[in-house]
Amino acid sequence: MKLSIKHQLRLSYVVTLVFCSLVGLIGYLSVQSLDRSMDAISVNGSALRDQMQADMMHDALRADVLAALMAATPEEQAAAKRDADEHAATFNKTLAALDAQATNAAVKAAVDKVRPDVDAYLKSAAAIVSQAGADQAGARQAFGGFMDGFRKLEGTMGALSELIEKDSDAVRAEGDAVVSSGSQRIMLVALAAMIATIAMGYFLIRGIVRPLEDAIVFADRIAQGNLAGDTDATSPADHTETGRLRRALEAMRTSLHGIVSSVRDGTDSIGTASQEIAAGNLDLSRRTETQASSLEETASSMEELTATVRQNADNARQASQLAASATEVATRGGAVVDQVVQTMGAIDEASRKIGDIIGVIEGIAFQTNILALNAAVEAARAGEQGRGFAVVASEVRALAQRSNSAAKEIKVLIDSTTGTVGEGNRLVGQAGSTMHEVVAGVQRVSDIMSEISAASREQEAGIGQVNQAIGEIDAATQQNAALVEEAAAAAESLQVQAEKLATLVGVFNLGASPGGAAAARPAVATGALALALR
């Protein structure tokens, strides 16, 4: 079973990681060994320095003893003793440090061996330095024994130094061996990693690049328009990414083959349909132009009718205003006639009252005449004494008669006036009734004119709406004409695109087809595609 690209890459990552881990582990172990060797070298270096310092103290003590023997003054003697004590202390300290740092058993045994000689040497030096201040001669005699100890210690110190140097050389050689061994191991692992990487790269290239190159060749064939022939698709058992890619490309080729076949079969139908659409659009364009001309004439007639109706509406509005004014005048005239009728009634009533008053005056005149007559009779009876009274009674009687005559004349005039006033009141009543009828008639005329004016306004508004609708229809017709022209252009463009599509589809090689169409040359596929898409 072939591994997928994902698993192959994962395996290469794991192998690379393993080799990197091995290199790191070997390097770590080598560094640890080298670190231990470096520690040992450092310790041996310190031991060697301590041994050299101890050897220096060995020589310094001899110089201190000589200085004490050669001291001429107590101050020089004291300085020599102080230096000897200081150098002895340093000698002991250095030797103790050397004993503590000794990692080799032989070195430690050599230090233990030199310790008695050092103690004897230090004791002899201290004794000579102390004796030199009091007894120079005795100190000089003891100096011979001191030098014997010096030479003996020099031999043991030399042996110790050689042993330490030999141990340092051994540690250094061990460190070099660790470095060499680590380097060899790292080189071996790196070489193995290189070989494994080359092998994995070879198998990855063989399992990935070659199938991809085959897929690219197949995709180039499809891009050049070659959809016929066997594609050598991998078997369904190949579940690698390249196998799935090849099967997907084969499915794409099959799908493109079916699509191009369907498009090629439908190209002629599209061309025929586009020609029929163009012819229908041309006929529709002519009918639309005729309809637009008719709508323009209808719109012109409706504009004239609108102007006439608008003028009639204005006239009806003016007549309605005049009728309203006449109604107002007639109403005021009726009110005046009503006032005249009321005034004539009041005059008739006053005439009747005056007649009654005249009747009363006639009664008074008649009674006055009777009284004057009775007074004259009584004056005649009185004789001479009643003559003056008789004259007055005669005057009163005459005055009563004239009053009676005047009252009768006034009554005649009042009766005549009352009759005239009654006739006038009757005529005024008839005039009031007539004015009321006139007012009612004028009101009806005003109402009718208002209705005519309202109807004219409604008619004007309706005609305006009709005119607006005709204008909208005209605009829609103009838009339809423009759309028809656009549709005609689109149909023509569709026909051109159908021809280009036929040219484009002809590029693809479908193999043997029912229509017997020849396969186009794949070399011109790109150029034909660019031409069809312009």
Image (cartoon, rainbow, N blue to C red):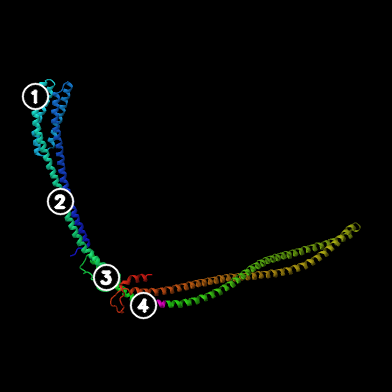
Determine if residue 116 is in view.
Answer: no
**Residue 251's disc number:** 3
Callout in the foreground (3, 1): 1
Q: Is residue 431 above or below residue 73?
A: below
Q: Kindly give the residue lying farthest to the top in the view shown.
A: 134
Residue hosting label 1? 142
- Tell me which label, 1 or 4, sits earlier in the chain: 1
Residue behind mark 4: 268
Q: Identify the mark nearer the N-term, 2 or 3.
A: 2
Q: Quadrant of residue 108?
A: top left
Q: Position of residue 480 (x, y in %)?
A: 47, 73
Of marks 1 and 2, which one's residue comes earlier in the chain?
1
Report the Cα–Cα distance between label 2 and label 3.
55 Å
**Residue 165 visible in the displayed image:** yes
Identify residue type, mark 2: Gln
What residue is disc 2 on? 184
Q: What amino acid type should be assigned to the residue bearing mark 3?
A: Ala
Mark 1 vs mark 4, foreground winner is 1
> Separation of disc 3 and disc 4 at Cα?
27 Å
Q: Residue at x 28, y 68 (%)?
A: 219
Write down the quadrant of residue 529 in the picture. Answer: bottom left
Q: Is residue 107 magenta?
A: no
- Provide the secondary structure element on which disc 4 rests: helix
Q: Quadrant of the C terminus?
A: bottom left
| Residue 295 screen position, x and y as percent | 52, 75
The residue under label 4 is which amino acid type? Answer: Asp
Q: Nearer the viewer, residue 13 or 258?
A: 13
Q: Which residues are magenta?
A: 265-277
* Magenta span dominant secondary structure: helix
* Left or right: where 7 falls relative to 529: left
Residue positioned 19% across, 64% down in the render:
2
Q: What is the distance, in whole Å, between disc 2 and disc 4 at their CAs?
A: 79 Å
